[in-house]
Image (cartoon, rainbow, N blue to C red):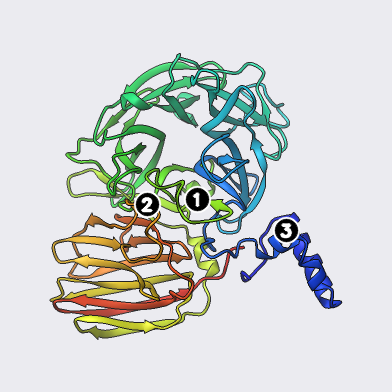
Amino acid sequence: MPDTPHRHPARRTVLAGALALAGTGALSAWSTAPATAAALRAYDEQYRPQVHFSPAKNWMNDPNGLIHHNGTYHLFFQYNPSGATWGNMSWGHATSPDLVHWEEQPVAIPHDDEEMVFSGSAVFDRDNTSGLGAAANPPLVAIYTSMVKATGRQRQSLAYSIDDGATWTRYAGNPVLDIGSDNFRDPKVFWHEPTARWVMVIALSAEHRISVYTSPDLKSWTHRSDFGPSAATGGVWECPDLFELPVAGAPGRRMWVLIVNLNPGGPAGGSGGQYFTGDFDGTRFTADPHDAPRWLDHGADAYAGVTYNDAPDGRRILVTWMNNWLYGEKVPTSPWRSANGFPRELGLRATPDGGAALVQQPVAELATLRRTPALRIAGRRVRAGATRLLRDAGQTYEIEAVLRPDGARRCGLEVRTGGGHRTRIGYDSGGELYVDRTASGDVGFAAEFPAVHRAPLALTDGVLRLRLIVDRSSVEVYTGDGTVCLTDQIFPGPDATGLGTFAEEGGMHVERLTVWPLRSAW
């Protein structure tokens, strides 16, 4: 079983009952009941993530409506209440006090006979500008894409909650924005203080454009400008986000970041996310010039990334869908399909050309799951070949490593090794960081899955600094400065618990390496 029971009241109650019966010698009779047996197995299936959110069952895709409100992080998500593939799209719901421990809630906004509930965002209407709450009890308002089942038209609609997100009511005046398009979706809405009005960024997906709308009340919207096409346009544009961040290394300077997800056309094939930096005046986003797309993540499994509204202390926290439309409905998990990437805190760092680059790291709350380190190494040389460091590192752990190539053409770490399975996180002397999942376990469910995913990376002082989150069915790789990330799903056998190093055509120095086993968040 996981280290702690899943934090869902119903599951916790069933588990407690099962344990009580075990104490009376009645466990065998109790465990024959399907509901109880399922509860005892919940969140402990072979590939079930232990530090990433996944629904108890059924299909999940894009994160939606990310908002922090009254001490609680709300995660809404595209959800099929009836099956493990895409369909019947509704807003699923989970809550957390800390971005680590999640409690799945009832479906927040279900599909109905007329519409599916596509992606969108949520805001706290503090001044009750919408009139959907009261001055003494302002509402949470969800702004989502309503896909009309009969016609395929995509319109923008509202739902609201006056009980802190526990229950939601569709607005009687829906839709609030309809331009007659079948490719007009994924509104991200926020309050723009300088102009004292709501701003929406939304994708004209097939046109590779992001439209900007404004509103005084979340109900009436005025078109202000469009951005795009620009940079990567190999697939439809989806799930935009727009926010401002301070620039580290440039005191007093702030810049705006526009995230645009696209499918296909990502850096690893299929789904991916890009970003632009620039200026936003409340009406128009103007991007800094760049010759090539700037990617949020160079792995295959970080899509539909959007950020939290109203996160405490001005933090900007990103959550992605940890899957890819190339094979998303085929991944070998049951009774659920898909998980979220671990939440990341975003920042900007000044670049020599006078611009800024996005930096990303796992939120600091990850450290609350750390156990006593299983391994600490300093100053070890690795000869050409593969070396096992731990026979049983487990299936869920965090690594911080400082590696120095010493003549090796390729070198790095091997995680989830054993039974012929391995995933390599390596550095190529040609100047690339990569994840090789060609032998990572079950790779046969889709031709596109077994692959090597690469990101350009220049070493600093000849040293590679890495941070890894390894879970039962994924690996997330961050460079030490946070400028490069790679996220990939993997599906190794349960005995693939080894950890090692490798070097080819030369050696490598392990200057420092620490491995922390991670407690289950469930």
Q: CA distance from mark 3 to mark 1?
A: 20 Å
Is 497 placed above or below 68 here? below
Foreground tag (1 vs 2): 2
> Which three-letter amino acid code belongs to the residue tagged 1?
Ser
Q: Check disc 1 and report its element: helix, strand or loop.
A: loop
- In this view, the residue farthest toward the right is 24
Mark toward the start of the polypeptide (3 vs 2): 3
- x and y, in percent, of residue 160 in the image: 65, 29
> Which three-letter amino acid code belongs to the residue tagged 3?
Arg
Mark toward the start of the polypeptide (1 vs 2): 1
Q: Residue at x 34, y 31 (%)?
A: 236
Position of residue 269 in the picture relative to residue 331 (left or right): left
Q: Residue at x 84, y 73 (%)?
A: 26
Q: Residue at x 52, y 58 (%)?
A: 52
Count of number-bearing discs: 3
Q: Which mark is residue 239?
A: none
Residue hosting label 1:
338
Q: Is residue 396 visible?
A: yes
- x and y, in percent, of residue 436 in the image: 29, 63
Mark toward the start of the polypeptide (3 vs 1): 3
- x and y, in percent, of residue 321 in the image: 46, 47
- x and y, in percent, of residue 196 in the image: 50, 25
Q: Check disc 2 and report its element: helix, strand or loop.
A: loop
Residue hosting label 3:
11
Residue hosting label 2:
446
Q: CA distance from mark 3 to mark 2?
A: 34 Å
Image quarter hosting the N terminus: bottom right
Image quarter hosting the C terminus: bottom right
Position of residue 1 in the picture relative to residue 274 (left or right): right
Q: Residue at x 67, y 24 (%)?
A: 132
